[in-house]
Image: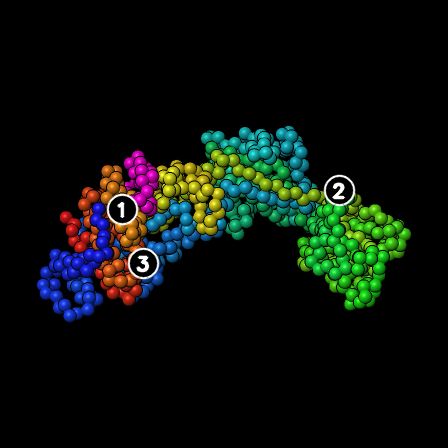
């Protein structure tokens, strides 16, 4: 182990910078003009060295490079002159290749590879599978729970006859039964190994009547234990076997493909024939050895053009109004009698009987002190009944009237005194409100406002209800058809299968697309935590991260390599990479045991990030342990960082680079030396060249180290 002493720097500069170079270049002058500045002497010395790759005779010399680096003339010239191989910085990241919808886009990396090859540089593939730089937006949808809302329109399907397992009115083929899946009643459909026909497992619906101008929407939610295929055929259409967009991906086909996990199948139908009858048949007998679960509650057939039962019932809590005047007071109360436990009441200066705010009577057009306004959205245009849950502070005339405005119309008294005792009561009561002409309200789809203004202080407002139905609310009010939210969970086994399939597909696509032009890869990058166990997220939600072991455990490493080996061209080298192996014995043990037991792994890519303080600590032991595996050893992302840009720091940096290369060649047998790749070849802090593309003192140390190859 060499320990550096900054007090010896002058001697080191003289000895290493001048005399050692004679080993590489016989034309270096034996005499030094002492009157020259030290920086000039170093520059003259560095200029005598040949290009780096001339010294790397037995292994590959590489460097990290961005797409911009390859497009920059100076940088590209430096790279192609001194190195044989480049490693992309981002073009191979999953979040670049994989789109949010799961589609692959190799445009960036193909451009990178083509540019590199044009400049005589090969490309190292770093990396295929990593926990970072992932498209987590897409990956987190894999076998994720699915949440849907039940339809607001009446469901023509009698779910009771399915849930009870009788399938009354249905025709069922194959191994079909009803059981709970993750707590939800489901139709279980099992395809055995001998499935031969598409309708071997199928469900034929009863016949439904088609009303004039009907437009049906069929929806069902299907969990698949692996990738499968199915279709729906119909009776009562002009074309009973249509190509349709089954999954909402904007492409039409005769069948749909299910990915592992939950799948939503939904289509709309309106090309009915003249029979006035309609039925559908779900056929799933395409794929052997797959099991499906169809959520019972999620199976629906609705008529979008039928009688509107409840497409848009709207409840508003008075206290949630966006604009509330200064004399509208929020009061809390018993949640058993007040919706949400809070209500609004008009009280002027603490006097519940007062009518005059001091700025005019409440009826004055410009008086907004006793007003509140609610903004809301309407989904379906139509005629709405408006109801208000309200009460007065005292019976028989105690704050029993108010004004109403919808969409900014002139305020009016909406029905009083026709309300009779309903507005005079001190009990919470629903009253129906009308337009100034005594009509209901027509509301277009979109945003609307409703405003109330006190005519007399002391009126209480609890809840507002718009509905297309004739439903007269009671209690707190409830919709005619309750739309409920259903969450479909996924079992651990299904989730594991789904994630394994995504991993296999990703590795396969990458190698199929790039394998002919890239012959060495980091297949799995940085798989281990500091304690030597496989890395997991630990519950932290970091953007761009996706820890494969969270879902499929440590097996993802072996799976990635077996898939890569099966799909890579013959002769392709497959590496596993890790950091801090020189300082972390737990990680080193994890890596050596992993590669020793796996014949699909060709080598270890060691990322080395050093500085002058850490120096060469642990490097010798690391190289000894890795060499014992018999695998190829590749130093990647090599950098030695200095904090100051001085000749002393650069001289020490030069010695560290030299010693790293010396140790690599002395400890690792030549047959196992794959190469060395620099993290930042051009850098004032860590590079062999400065930001002006001039050689720095470390260039000499690195070249001297390379020249000692046998």
Residue at (29, 46) in percent of width and height: 606
Residue at (38, 42) in percent of width and height: 529
Q: Is residue 632 left or right of residue 158?
A: left
Q: N-terminal of the two: label 1 or label 3? A: 1
The magenta segment: 578-603
- SS at mark 2 in the image: loop
Which residue is label 1 attached to? 617
Q: Is residue 583 left or right of residue 495?
A: left
Which residue is label 2 attached to? 336
Mark 1 residue crowding within 10 angstroms, few (<14) / some (14–19) / many (20+): some
Cα distance in 3D space between marks 2 and 1:
71 Å
Q: N-terminal of the two: label 2 or label 1? A: 2
Q: Position of residue 321 (x, y in %)?
A: 71, 56
Which residue is label 3 attached to? 643
> Is residue 175 or residue 127 the one in the foreground?
127
> Is residue 403 or residue 239 the one in the foreground?
403
In front: label 2 or label 1:
1
Q: Position of residue 623 (x, y in %)?
A: 24, 43
Q: What is the quadrant of residue 27 in the picture?
A: bottom left
Instruction: Identify whether 226 is placed above or below 138.
Output: above
- SS at mark 1 in the image: loop
Q: Position of residue 590 (x, y in %)?
A: 33, 38
């Amino acid at each position: 182990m060499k320990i550096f002493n900054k007090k010896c720097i002058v001697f080191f500069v003289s000895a290493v910078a001048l005399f050692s170079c004679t080993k590489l270049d016989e034309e270096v002058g034996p005499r030094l003009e002492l009157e020259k500045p030290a920086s000039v002497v170093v520059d003259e010395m560095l200029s005598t060295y040949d290009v780096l790759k001339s010294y790397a005779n037995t292994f590959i010399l590489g460097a990290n490079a961005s797409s911009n680096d390859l497009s920059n003339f100076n940088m590209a010239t430096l790279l192609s002159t001194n190195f044989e191989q480049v490693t992309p910085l981002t073009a191979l990241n999953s979040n670049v290749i994989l789109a949010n919808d799961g589609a692959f886009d190799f445009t960036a990396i193909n451009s990178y590879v083509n540019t590199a090859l044009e400049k005589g540089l090969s490309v190292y593939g770093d990396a295929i599978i990593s926990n970072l730089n992932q498209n987590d937006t897409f990956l987190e949808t894999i076998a994720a729970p699915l949440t849907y809302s039940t339809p607001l329109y009446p469901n023509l399907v009698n779910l009771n006859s399915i849930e009870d397992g009788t399938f009354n009115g249905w025709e069922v083929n194959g191994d079909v039964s009803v059981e709970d899946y993750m707590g939800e009643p489901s139709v279980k459909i099992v395809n055995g190994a001998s499935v031969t026909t598409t309708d071997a497992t199928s469900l034929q619906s009863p016949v439904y009547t088609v009303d004039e101008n009907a437009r049906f929407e069929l929806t069902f939610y299907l969990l698949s234990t692996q990738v499968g295929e199915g279709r729906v055929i119909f009776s009562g259409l002009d074309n009973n076997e249509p190509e349709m967009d089954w999954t909402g991906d904007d492409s039409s086909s005769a069948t749909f493909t299910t990915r592992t996990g939950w799948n939503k199948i939904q289509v709309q139908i309106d090309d009915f024939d003249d029979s006035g009858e309609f039925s559908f048949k779900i056929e799933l007998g395409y794929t052997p050895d797959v099991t499906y679960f169809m959520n019972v509650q999620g199976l629906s057939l609705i008529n979008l053009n039928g009688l509107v039962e409840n497409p848009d019932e709207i409840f508003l809590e008075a206290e949630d109004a966006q604009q509330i005047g200064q004399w509208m007071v929020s009061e809390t109360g018993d949640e058993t009698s007040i919706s949400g436990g809070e209500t609004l009441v008009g009280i002027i200066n603490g006097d519940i009987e007062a009518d005059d705010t001091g700025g005019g009577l409440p009826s004055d057009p410009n008086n907004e002190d006793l007003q509140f306004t609610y903004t809301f959205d309407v989904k379906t245009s139509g005629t709405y009944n408006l109801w208000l849950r309200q009460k007065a502070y005292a019976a028989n005339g105690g704050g029993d009237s108010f004004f109403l405005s919808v969409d900014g119309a002139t305020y009016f008294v909406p029905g009083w005194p026709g309300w009779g005792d309903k507005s005079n009561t001190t009990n919470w009561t629903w009253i129906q409100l009308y337009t100034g002409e005594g009509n209901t309200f027509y509301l277009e789809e979109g945003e609307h406002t409703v405003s109330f203004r006190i005519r007399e202080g002391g009126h209480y407002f609890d809840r507002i209800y718009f509905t297309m139905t004739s439903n007269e609310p009671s209690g707190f009010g409830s919709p005619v058809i309750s739309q409920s939210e259903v969450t479909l969970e996924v079992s651990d086994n299904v989730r594991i299968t789904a994630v394994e399939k995504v991993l296999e597909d990703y590795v396969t696509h990458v190698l199929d697309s790039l394998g002919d032009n890239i012959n060495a890869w980091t297949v799995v990058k940085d798989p281990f935590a500091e304690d030597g166990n496989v890395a997991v997220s630990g519950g932290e939600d970091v953007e761009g991260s996706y820890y494969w072991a969270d879902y499929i455990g440590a097996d993802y490493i072996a799976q990635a390599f077996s898939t890569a080996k099966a799909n890579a061209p013959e002769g392709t080298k497959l590496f596993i990479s890790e950091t801090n192996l020189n300082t972390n014995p737990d990680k080193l043990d994890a890596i050596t045991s992993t590669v020793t037991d796996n014949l699909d792994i060709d080598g270890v890519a060691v990322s080395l990030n050093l500085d002058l303080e850490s120096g060469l600590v642990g490097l010798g032991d690391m190289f000894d342990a890795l060499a014992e595996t018999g695998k190829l050893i590749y130093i990647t992302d090599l950098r030695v960082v200095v904090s100051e840009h001085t000749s002393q720091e650069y001289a020490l940096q030069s010695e560290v680079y030299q010693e790293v290369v010396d140790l690599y060649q002395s400890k690792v047998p030549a047959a196992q030396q794959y190469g060395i790749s620099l993290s930042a070849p051009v850098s004032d802090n860590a590079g062999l060249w400065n930001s002006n593309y001039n050689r720095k003192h470390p260039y000499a140390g690195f070249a001297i180290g390379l020249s000692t190859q046998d």
